[in-house]
Amino acid sequence: MRLVFAGTPDFAVAALDALHAAGHEIVGVYTQPDRPAGRGRKLTPSPVAQRAAALGLPLFKPERLKGEAEQQQLRTLAPEVMVVVAYGLILPQAVLDIPRLGCLNIHASLLPRWRGAAPIQRAIEAGDAESGVTIMRMDAGLDTGPMLLREAVPIDAQTTAATLHDALAAVGARLIVEALRRLADGTLAEQVQPADGVTYARKLDKDEARIAWHEPAAQIARRIRAFNPVPVAWSELDGERVRFYAASAERGDTAGAEPGRIVRADAHGIAIATGDGLLRAETLQWPGGKPLSAAQIASGRTLAGRRFT
């Protein structure tokens, strides 16, 4: 099919590769403008921009799509379909109406659960047993369009945002190729999203990453996994900001220790009192260092009795 692709982060790259490999005619790739990145804050193309350039595909980086000039540029490409994956811009109705067969979106959740900006992280944080990918036909609402294909992916006690991101990106890439095949042969059925079960995955806020030790250990552990690799959960220990990459809830008596107090530190983990139960920290990072296992940390630091705040 003749299509335009719109996406920005790493999550979208797998889908772009899959569509290109499937032989679709990609007449344009839309992505966010270059943004400052790295310690030098150098303007850097998005992951999708970099991949599109490597594939030799026409690349467009408009600041917005609300203007007539930007919309006319898209019309001249005459796409049959527009595939959208974590693009980062709201598509006005005038843009949705341009492709003859509509705009299809790869969304990283089992809609209608977790509409919005951070479905991967919010699913883990909430303790969901599964996430997944939904291919939907876009409308003017926020992830409200009819569903075309869905596939679930399990979430377990080791799942982080990083591992779930990669799993869902691969599923989304496979499903969008299947969706376009069915769209071409007329066998792609639509299903209206149910009104029940709607939740919204609000955008991540860096302030959320600070660990609240009065919360239950199980909830803190989920948030640590949800915020790995960004923004990374953290807490202060004697004025140093320590980052938490892996942890689990542990049954055990806190012996009356106040939340945040380290009650044990050994090769098996660093046990920290919480509002309900113990958090066993497994991978931590001190300022200026690299992430280390609990065994490595416990062998080089005296931690028992100190308190995270």
Image: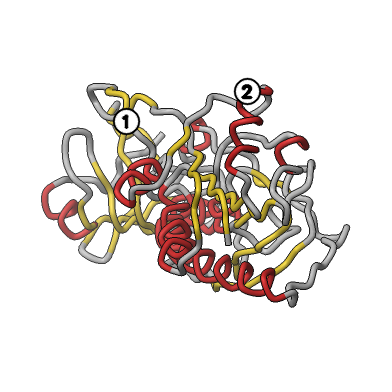
Tell which tag, 1 or 2, sits nearer the viewer: 2
Residue 178 image point, x, y percent: 59, 73
Quadrant placement of the N terminus: bottom right
Q: Amino acid at mark 2?
A: Ala
Q: Are marks 1 and 2 in contact (CB under 8 Å)?
A: no
Vertical order, 270 against 76 (above or below): below
Q: Nearer the viewer, residue 73 or 239?
A: 73
Residue 149 image point, x, y percent: 68, 70
For label 1, count other residues whose C-alpha is less than 10 Å away and answer few (under 14), some (14-19) or many (20+): some
Q: Is residue 173 left or right of residue 181?
A: left
Mark 1–mark 2 Cα distance, whole angstroms, equals 25 Å
Q: Amino acid at mark 1?
A: Thr
Label number found at residue 69? 2
Q: Is residue 227 left or right of residue 79?
A: left
Vertical order, 70 against 23 (above or below): above
| Residue at the image position 39 percent from the left and 28 percent from the top | 34
Quadrant placement of the C terminus: top left
Q: How is the image coloured?
A: secondary structure
Q: Secondary structure at mark 1?
A: strand
Q: Nearer the viewer, residue 145 or 202?
A: 145
Vertical order, 203 against 18 (above or below): above
* Quadrant in the picture for residue 140: top right
| Residue at the image position 82 percent from the left and 67 percent from the top | 191
- Number of numbered markers: 2
Residue 164 image point, x, y percent: 47, 62
* Quadrant in the picture for residue 198: bottom right
Q: Nearer the viewer, residue 266 or 231?
A: 231
Q: Is residue 231 left or right of residue 205?
A: left
Q: Is residue 33 visible?
A: yes
User: Residue beneath label 1, please?
Assistant: 44
Q: Secondary structure at mark 2?
A: helix
